[in-house]
Amino acid sequence: MLRLIGLILGLTISQAHGACQPVFKADAAKLVTADFASVIRRGVKTYDYKQIEVLYSPFSMVEDASCIDEKQLNIEVKSGNGEWVAVDTRYDALGGGRYRWTVDAVPCKDHMVRIWVHGPGGSASLEYPETILAASEENIIKSRFEPATPAELTAKNSGDNKLEVSWLPSECATSYEISYGKDIDSIQSKILPASQGSNIYLDGLTSCARYDIYVTAYIGDTVYSESASVTFTTQPEVSSALTLEPTIDRDTSAVTATWQAFEKLSCVDSYAVSVCKEKADSCVDTQTVKTDDALAYLQYSADSLDQCSDYTLQIKPLYPGMELDPRIVAFRTKSPAAEGAEQGLEPVIATATGQGQMIEVTWTPVHCAEFYEVFQQVNTGGDWEFVHKTSDPRASLAGVPCTEYRYGVSVTIDGVRSPIMEAGSSVMTKLSNSEAFQAPNLEIIPTESGAELSWDHGACIPSYVVRVCSTSSTPMCEESTVIRDSLAHNITHEIDNLHPCSEYSLEILPQIDGESFEPDRDIFRTAFPAPSPPEGVTAERKGNTVEFRWEQVECSSGYQIIQVQDGGNSEVVWETEDPTELRVVLNGLEPCKTYKYGVSAVVGGEASPSTDIDPISVPPKFGMMDRPTIEVLENVNDTVSFVFNKATTNAHCQVEYYQVRYSSLVSEENIEKTIYPEVEDQRITIELPGASGPGLNLEGRVKYLGHETETQWIRSQEPQIQSNGIGSESSILVPIIIGILVGIVVLVIIVFFLVKKKREQNKYDAEKASSDKDETQKLNGDMPES
């Protein structure tokens, strides 16, 4: 029974409370203040833009204070365009029914506040009508608000040597600093305004390199967050292995290679390394070498290689999803020691081939030889003389007739040359008269007046006859006898008294008792002399032309004329490749210019210094078309302004002075005046009595600088220009005279039309009278007689 009574009582109380629904008063918002937190110190109010402070009196804001529960008071805050968020902190009871909420805020965003009250009968909310506006950047900085560290920083490849870096925006950040580099010494930075988003592209990066990337959020220039960081490795290029610089340590049958892996290709974790002989498909001992961050260098070794053989080391980076080219380095295994290698050359054999003076030397090939060198001794005396280098075990050499030779061969292995191994016997060449004799190793060095000759000779030839002939249509020949020095096996001989730059034939005949030989013929040309300028040069000006003449220069292939205008740069204005062209006329000389000329001869492709010809000054032109003109610019109140205009033909002429003379009806006397201009084309102003009236005669002439003659007198093209000035008598008379003339013309026209009209009226009256008379007579003729 008691339980039932309690249940009924509880239901009654619940119903009573349920009827008490919280309702805000119409002016409830007046009891609320919401703004950024503030404090007053020494009379100055300062704000803390990192917090919002809400003050209100909830029990005074509702119609019935008993309808709300103090323990269930709550507020919600909305930041920017976000959602309403209930505040999870507790309020401060200030007494007198006043409560304060302090809420963390984002100072760069607008905030709105909504107040909730709850009671047994339900809940009610009131949205504070005033928005808490975001703080300025300056106030945010003053409040020491620090932006959050950029979150979810990522980097990914975005093309060749290019990365895309992105992150989540930090609240209130105005910009981001993105720093990146392969090490501390290569850090670069970029600034990205927050208004442009939160991702950036980094280009120009090194392929296959590890980069440390840092992103920092900034407010202004002084407030910043902690830096977010990420490490990323760019992908390699197909040819990235070319950056590897392996060091190769080789032996006779083994090789060891080392290379810097991380510093060069930090994106590669392993390499396929092999040694290949001759062809890439014959590679041996392929190994996979993995990187080790603890090691600065990676190493690969291979053995069981052939001695003194050519190989290639191939280092191929392995990268997922890409086929990279290998780094290929050629090397050669070492050879055995070269000591005693000359013994392997035996036997060395030298034999005459029977074809002229050709000698063939053969020897036994030596394993691992790099090359062989052949040496000789002439007439089995003197030092060894190097004559040939080859990689084959044989050599064909040209000897000198009737000369004894001894030969030897050395071998070089791994850069070490062996001693010379001599042939078992010497060989003697023969001199044959069945073919034309050609001096062995003949060398011809032309000189300006001859040539210097040298050739090898044999011991059986006591002397030679040297014949030199010109190759012209009427050849001239000279012969000389050369007796050899018995101790030397080389002949030197000098030919002189020849003409320069001329073609000659050369024959050398051996002189042996009882033998005759046909000579071989060589052609040579003597050298050109040093270029010299022509002589007898003359230059004669005629009007705007100049004629040059000069004498022919020996061995010249052409001529040039060099010109300098008014002290400027020199230039070639005429040239010919005909050495017989010794005269030319140049046109286009301009008046009042000074020209300096020189004539140069071209000898052996080189131009000689030019002759020095006296400067040629061209005078002004004084023809009808060359006269200046006078242009009157203004004529006001007997003051005339005018300029002299030079003719275009005399455009380069400088004026020394002008002379003018003038007269008028007021002053018939010719007055002359000399004017020295300060500048070219100067405006000249003079006062002339009566100039503004009729009858002005203005003449002038010009004296050009550096020339004695003035131009002829010329008359102004516009001798009189009437002024429109108010004070001029002519300006008053002219319109009066014109008005009178116009009146006379109008009066004549009126009189003409009146006279014409009068005559037409008289004619009409006469014709009418005649017509009336005829009509009267006709009527009288028709009436019957009474």
Image: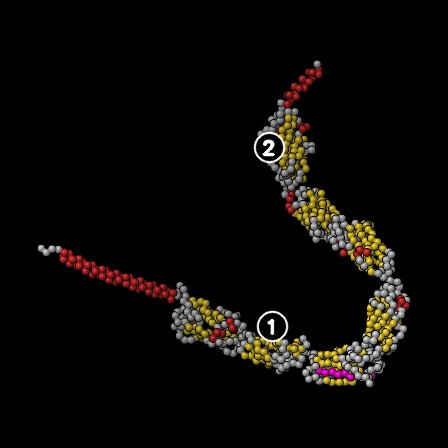
Which of these two is toward me, 27 or 712? 712
| SS at mark 1 in the image | loop
Q: Residue 210: image x %, image y %?
A: 75, 50
Pick the quarter of the image with the C terminus: bottom left
- In the rendered image, residue 463 lying in the magenta stretch gets the answer yes
Say whether residue 336 is left or right of residue 590.
right
Q: Is residue 365 visible?
A: yes
Q: Which residue is mark 1?
A: 568
Say whether residue 80 is left or right of residue 712.
right
Q: Residue 593: image x %, image y %?
A: 56, 74
Q: Which residue is mark 2?
A: 30
Pick the quarter of the image with the N terminus: top right
Q: Nearer the viewer, mark 2 or mark 1?
A: 1
Amino acid carrying label 1: it is Gly
Density class for disc 1 (Cα within 10 Å; few <14, some 14-19, many ≥20) is few
Density class for disc 2 (Cα within 10 Å; few <14, some 14-19, many ≥20) is few
Q: Could you tell me if the residues under marks 2 and 1 are in contact, i.e. CB atoms within 8 Å?
A: no
Residue range (magenta): 462-470
In the image, residue 64 above or below residue 717: above
The count of marks equals 2
3D distance between C-alphas at marks 2 and 1: 94 Å
Q: Residue 699: image x %, image y %?
A: 44, 73
Residue at the top extreme of this rendering: 1
Q: Residue 351: image x %, image y %?
A: 86, 74
Which of these two is toward me, 597 or 652? 597
Quarter of the image holding residue 75?
top right
Which of these two is toward me, 416 or 751? 416
Q: Is residue 220 visible?
A: no
Q: Overall secondary structure of the magenta stretch?
A: strand
| SS at mark 2 in the image | helix
Residue under the image location 31 percent in, 64 percent down:
744
